[in-house]
Amino acid sequence: MEQATELFFRVTKLFQCKDVYLRRLTYLLIKELANSSDTVIIVTNCLQQDINRTDMETFRANAMRVLCRIIDGAMLGQIGALRSPAHHRRHHH
């Protein structure tokens, strides 16, 4: 478990990378490694930033998929607030 947590935190640094393929791998790893509420809270901010991006549709779509996979019922209220800007942008462009 400790090794998975360490790998998870190292993978989150890849959110700084702009390469589409490497970012896709990052999303896949996050889905597999985010298994506790502590790790989910940390990565949620990175995913929210990708959802609210206007320049990379691919990042937005993948971040939404990952976020839906890793959150639990207790976090839904927090996540609902970030879906609104993404939904608004989609319907007004």
Image (tube, rainbow, N blue to C red):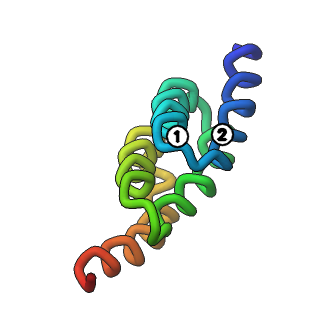
Q: Crowding at label 1, few (<14), some or many (≥20) Cα neighbours within 10 Å?
A: many
Name the residue carrying label 1: 23
Q: Using residue 32 as the reference point, say whether residue 2 is left or right of it.
A: right
On residue 78, the disc is none
Which residue is located at x 53 percent, y 27 percent?
29
Say above or below: 15 vs 56: above
Q: Using residue 27 as the reference point, say whether residue 68 is left or right of it.
A: left
Toward the viewer: 72 or 41? 41
Say above or below: 13 vs 79: above
> Which quadrant: the C terminus?
bottom left
* Three-letter code, disc 2: Leu
Which residue is located at x 46 percent, y 30 percent?
28
Which residue is located at x 62 percent, y 57 percent?
45
Q: Using residue 6 as the reference point, say whether residue 25 is left or right of it.
A: left
Say above or below: 17 vs 86: above
Toward the viewer: 59 or 9? 59
On the image, the x and y values in percent for residue 21 come to 47, 36
Element assignment for label 2: helix
> Which quadrant: the N terminus?
top right
* Three-letter code, disc 1: Arg
Element assignment for label 1: helix
Q: CA distance from mark 1 to mark 2?
A: 7 Å
Toward the viewer: 44 or 62? 62
Q: Earlier in the sequence, mark 1 or mark 2?
A: 2
Asked where in the image residue 69 lies, by quadrant, the reply is: top left
Q: Crowding at label 2, few (<14), some or many (≥20) Cα neighbours within 10 Å?
A: some
Asked where in the image residue 10 lies, by quadrant, the reply is: top right
On residue 14, the disc is 2
User: Disc 1, disc 2: CB below 8 Å?
Assistant: yes
On the image, the x and y values in percent for residue 87 come to 31, 73
On the image, the x and y values in percent for residue 66 come to 43, 42
Which residue is located at x 72 percent, y 40 percent?
13
